[in-house]
């Protein structure tokens, strides 16, 4: 069973699709049970290319479509009118590459701010200090304006009172009710994707782990998968099992942490403290098997650094089992607490139809009836270790998201425990591989926030020409803005926490 | 001024300066312990105050004299409340009636509300609007609860509260009801759960705190001390109502009883802060109406009894 090669190891099919046919083609593909995994651009000697990655949700495969733009062409017909989930991807392409999606319904900058010089396209050109000093003629960003008697705006952030990431929230309110929310990100751009095309593949893992540090393990696994998929080799099953166990531990720790965060936003101190203690315990187990509470520096392509010994794995598995028991007695503090339920019920509702349009992923999607889980779709062998289900609810409110996350945290502890118990230490050399020319490598992982994709494309010299990371939050941010509408201003923090999105993962 | 009055004033000064900060320290430490955290030391509020006083204030250029003077005005109002009410179990050095107390509390609220709007920030305006909304419930509750007590003691002077001798044969539920109403009003006034999360850093959920966001340095120190004083005085008044029900007359017994009851209320606040979930903004009237109903019933009972 476990010797069966993963769908990602056989060469990723690359297909050239004329740009004029792309919109119709994607529309057909999406109605045939495929998902738009990501949409991005890259430069080639003959002009820019639009890259679409399709995930076959029924058969568990990935395909990459490449659409060549004519030389010097700086625009194409926007896909968003037919394919709403392309909305942010196209805004990003516009920002980073200067390729304009014509006919995009809401084209404005996504991550490039007013203070930057005009005509700055970070991925399409070499960004030098001289360029950054250029005079700034950029048109000011225009927030959507809600008009009417008594409507006022509340700007929040980008600097917040808590120790959280920077993001600007512009609320248009009528009294206490949110009429519209516009979210502005892009305050943590670090040039991650640019850096990944400029370094040796063995150094990449340090960069990808920092893409979104609360998802360090999932990013490292997706990166390892992508390199292995590109090189056409597979890591030994024990190493894959250990990697998946790390991803599950990360999932459990983050969900438990956010359940505590939900308690905190409810002002429920007892619950907040109980979950915080439990999160610490899970991170302690992570440290036990990897030497790092956030599991950095051990998950590498083809191998695993500092492989834990068998007794250590067994001990960790037992402690995870203990943790699960504690979690089961802690969850009712929140989910069987009638006043907490009353606050969460019907708040921040994300309708199923809208969730489908936005291409929602992860727990937020599963709370709105989107039954999509990478672990199920790609039938990873290590997940056959036990019977387990992904929760699927339809209410789409804060309560549904809290329930989904509580169930997933419990399942994650179970899975991690069973997987770790069956890990036998193996040594796999971090063998030197040559990356093949003109190929694609894909890593796809169900991170705790949902589908995380790493896409590597090499050029004719076998050099990485494009490294694209699609964080799950990228799909879900719009949903948060929409779900907040019609709720009270004082309920927004709770709604926000139930989604628990990443700022840095969206802004590479 | 007689020696006894001077002694009384000195004693009151010490109690009004030390007790509030001590109570806030106890409340915070206790809340932390209940949540399995170590928490700050009990004397931390004193250090905080000293630290804030040493710091310089940064004041927005958009603000006018209202913002600058509001902390002093509202603190003065609360200091006067502390001088005219027998909150500490002994007679107040200055005579004042309940109308004066309500007026002083409203003055403090208005000063802070105006200052919040003076900053021109969205949070300030939002906080002031929320605070005024709640005051619709809190002010009548306080008027009626104190009126009920006044009816029982037979005059409007609040010092009557500290002389239970005038009460003949129990209060027939008037005082416990008034105490409950006043306690609920105090919960709103002092930003306690389930009305407002006192430890939150989320501006969007704040009510009273949102008005104070722009303050720093010495002015913030005044406001911190004021909120501690507010908590102590209001809990002290609740304690007087309960002590009268128990007909404790001896001044020393009353003083000890008051301290004990205030401590009990602080412990209760710490427990409620830990266990309760903050109410939905739209559900707050459902809770606050209880305060109004209790105080109204207390008044009616007192009037019938008289």
Image (cartoon, coloured by chain):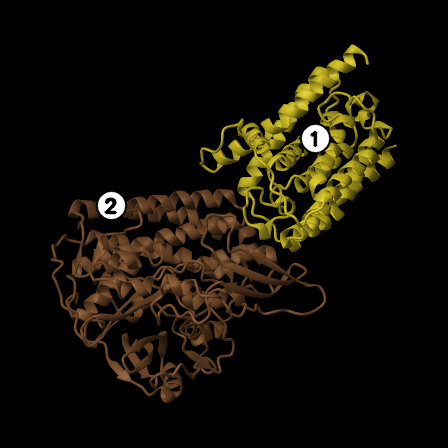
Chain colours: A brown, B yellow
| B291 w.r.t. B252: above or below | below
Question: How far from the left and from the top, in percent, is residue B274?
Answer: 53, 40
Is there a contact, CB below 8 Å, between mark 1 and mark 2? no
Residue drawn at (70%, 30%) of the image: B233
Q: Nearer the viewer, residue A133 or B36?
A: A133
Q: Please give left or right for residue A145 compared with residue B168 in the image.
A: left
Q: Is residue B170 above or below residue B104?
A: above
Which residue in the structure is indicated by mark 2?
A291
Disc 1: CA contacts within 10 A as few (<14), some (14-19) or many (>=20)? many
Residue position marked by numbered label 1 in the rendering: B233
Secondary element at tag 2 = loop
Return the x and y of residue A336 as percentages of the image width and height: 49, 51
- Residue A421 lies, in percent from the top left, at 21, 51
Query: Is residue A415 at all visible to an observer of this figure?
Result: no
- Measured along the vertical axis of the image, is residue A29 above or below residue B9? below
* Numbered badge on residue A216: none
- Res. A454 in view: yes
- Say few, some or many: other residues with alpha carbon within 10 Å of mark 2 (under 14 / 14 to 19 / 20 or more): some
Question: Disc 1 vs disc 2: which is toward the camera?
Answer: 2
The residue at 56%/36% (across/down) is B270
- Which quadrant is home to the C terminus of chain B? top right
User: Whole-Å distance between the Cαs marked 1 and 2?
Assistant: 53 Å
The residue at 20%/48% (across/down) is A313
Q: Quadrant of residue A129?
A: bottom left
């Amino acid at each position: 069973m476990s010797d069966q090669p993963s769908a990602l190891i056989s060469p990723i099919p690359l297909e050239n699709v004329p740009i004029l046919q792309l919109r119709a083609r994607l529309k057909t593909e999406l109605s045939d049970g495929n998902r738009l995994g990501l949409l991005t651009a890259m430069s080639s000697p003959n002009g820019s290319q639009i890259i679409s990655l399709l995930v076959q949700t029924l058969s568990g495969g990935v395909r990459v479509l490449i659409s060549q733009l004519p030389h010097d062409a700086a625009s194409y017909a926007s896909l968003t009118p037919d394919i709403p989930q392309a909305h942010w991807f196209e805004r990003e392409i516009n920002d980073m590459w200067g390729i304009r999606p014509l006919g995009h319904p809401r084209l404005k900058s996504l991550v490039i701010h007013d203070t930057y010089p005009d005509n700055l396209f970070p991925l399409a050109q070499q960004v030098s200090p001289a360029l950054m000093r250029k005079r700034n003629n950029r048109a000011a960003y225009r927030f959507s304006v809600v008009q009417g008697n008594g409507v006022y705006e509340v700007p929040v952030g980008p600097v917040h009172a808590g120790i959280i990431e920077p993001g600007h929230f512009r609320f248009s309110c009528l009294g206490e009710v949110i009429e519209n929310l516009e979210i502005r990100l892009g305050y943590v751009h670090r040039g991650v994707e640019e850096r990944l095309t400029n370094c040796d593949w063995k150094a990449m893992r340090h960069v990808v782990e920092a893409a979104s540090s609360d998802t360090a393990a999932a990013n490292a696994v997706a990166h390892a998968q992508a390199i292995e998929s590109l090189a056409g080799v597979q890591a030994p099953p024990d190493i894959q099992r250990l990697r998946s166990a790390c991803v599950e531990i990360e999932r459990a720790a983050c969900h438990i942490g956010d359940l505590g965060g939900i308690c905190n936003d409810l002002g429920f101190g007892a619950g907040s403290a109980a979950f915080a203690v439990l999160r610490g315990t899970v991170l302690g187990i992570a440290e036990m098997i990897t030497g790092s509470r956030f599991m950095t520096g051990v998950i590498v392509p083809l191998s695993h650094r500092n492989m834990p010994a068998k007794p250590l794995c067994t001990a960790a598995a037992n402690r995870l089992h203990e943790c699960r028991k504690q979690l089961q007695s802690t969850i009712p503090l929140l989910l069987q607490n009638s006043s907490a339920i009353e606050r969460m019920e019907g708040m921040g509702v994300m309708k199923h139809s809208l969730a489908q349009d936005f291409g929602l992923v992860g727990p937020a999607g599963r709370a709105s009836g989107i039954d999509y889980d990478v672990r199920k779709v790609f039938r990873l062998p290590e997940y056959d270790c036990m019977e387990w289900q992904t929760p699927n609810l339809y209410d789409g409110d804060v309560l549904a998201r809290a329930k989904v996350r509580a169930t997933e945290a419990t399942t994650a502890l179970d899975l991690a425990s069973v997987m770790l118990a069956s890990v036998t230490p193996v040594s796999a050399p971090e063998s030197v591989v040559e990356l093949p020319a003109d190929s694609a490598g894909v890593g796809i992982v169900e991170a705790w926030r949902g589908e995380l994709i790493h896409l590597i494309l090499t050029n004719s010299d076998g050099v990485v020409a494009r490294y694209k990371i699609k964080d799950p939050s990228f799909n879900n941010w719009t949903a948060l803005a929409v779900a907040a509408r019609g709720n009270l201003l004082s309920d927004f923090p709770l709604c926000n926490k139930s989604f628990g999105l990443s700022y840095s993962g969206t802004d590479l | 001024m007689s020696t006894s009055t001077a002694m009384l004033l000195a004693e009151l000064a010490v109690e009004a300066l030390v007790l509030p900060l001590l109570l806030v320290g106890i409340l915070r430490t206790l809340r932390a312990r209940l949540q399995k955290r170590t928490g700050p030391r009990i004397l931390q509020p004193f250090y905080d105050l000293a630290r804030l006083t040493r710091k310089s204030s940064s004041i927005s250029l958009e603000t006018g004299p209202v913002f600058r003077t509001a902390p002093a005005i509202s603190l003065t109002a609360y200091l006067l409340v502390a001088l005219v009410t027998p909150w500490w179990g002994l007679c107040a050095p200055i005579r004042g009636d309940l109308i004066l107390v309500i007026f002083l509390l409203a003055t403090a609220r208005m000063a802070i509300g105006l200052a919040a709007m003076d900053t021109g920030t969205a949070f300030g305006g939002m906080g002031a609007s929320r605070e005024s909304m709640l005051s619709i419930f809190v002010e009548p509750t306080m008027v009626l609860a104190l009126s009920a007590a006044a009816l029982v003691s037979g005059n409007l002077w609040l010092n009557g509260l500290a002389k239970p001798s005038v009460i003949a044969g129990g209060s027939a539920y008037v005082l416990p009801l008034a105490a409950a109403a006043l306690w609920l009003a105090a919960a709103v006034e002092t930003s306690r759960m389930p009305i407002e999360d006192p430890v939150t850093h989320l501006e969007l959920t704040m009510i009273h705190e949102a008005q104070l966001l722009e303050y720093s340095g010495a002015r913030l120190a005044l406001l911190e001390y004021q909120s501690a004083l507010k908590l102590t005085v209001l809990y002290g008044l609740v304690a007087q109502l309960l002590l009268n029900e128990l007909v404790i007359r001896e001044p020393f017994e009353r003083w000890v009883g008051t301290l004990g009851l205030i401590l009990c209320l602080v412990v209760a606040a710490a427990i409620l802060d830990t266990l309760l979930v903050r109410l939905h903004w739209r559900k707050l009237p459902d809770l606050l109406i209880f305060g109004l109903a209790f105080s109204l019933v207390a008044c009616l009972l007192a009037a019938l009894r008289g």
